[in-house]
Amino acid sequence: MERIDVSILGRDYSMACAPSEKDALLAAIRLVDQRMVAIKGSGKIAGNERIAVTAAIQLALELLAMKAPDGPLSNIALGDFKRKIDQMNSLIDEVVGKATY
């Protein structure tokens, strides 16, 4: 593992990651920091914890709205796909629970 020191919204953090994941982690940190700085700059939300939660929710919404670029699932958002899988798993659990051996 490699140790990296980063700054998010002016606070320093020390993290560990595999060397092969360093570039992706640094890109993620830049994205989170940029989002938090923008939220803080809007002046609508105060407090680092509230800013962090707001940024996390915004990024999660974007992630769940993402769609596959091509292929048979390109018209389904990731969040919708996950909900459908969760519904199918619940239905399977229900049916298996009612089955008698």
Image (cartoon, rainbow, N blue to C red):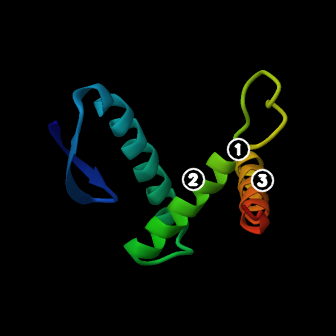
The residue that mark 3 highlights is 88
Q: Earlier in the sequence, mark 3 or mark 1?
A: 1
Q: Amino acid type of disc 1?
A: Leu
Quarter containing the C terminus: bottom right
Q: CA distance from mark 2 to mark 3?
A: 26 Å
User: Going by the image, does 48 lie left or right of 69?
Assistant: left
Which circle marks residue 78 in the picture?
1
Which circle marks residue 92 in the picture?
none
Q: Please tell me which residue lies in front, 76 or 25.
A: 76
Which circle marks residue 59 in the picture?
2
Q: Amino acid type of disc 3?
A: Met
Foreground mark, 2 or 3, reads: 3
Q: Please tell me which residue lies in front, 93 or 30.
A: 93
Q: What percent of the width, then of the height, locates residue 95?
A: 79, 61
Q: Residue at x 44, y 51 (%)?
A: 32
Foreground mark, 2 or 1, reads: 1
Question: Are there few (<14), some (14-19), or many (20+) residues within 10 Å of tag 2?
Answer: some
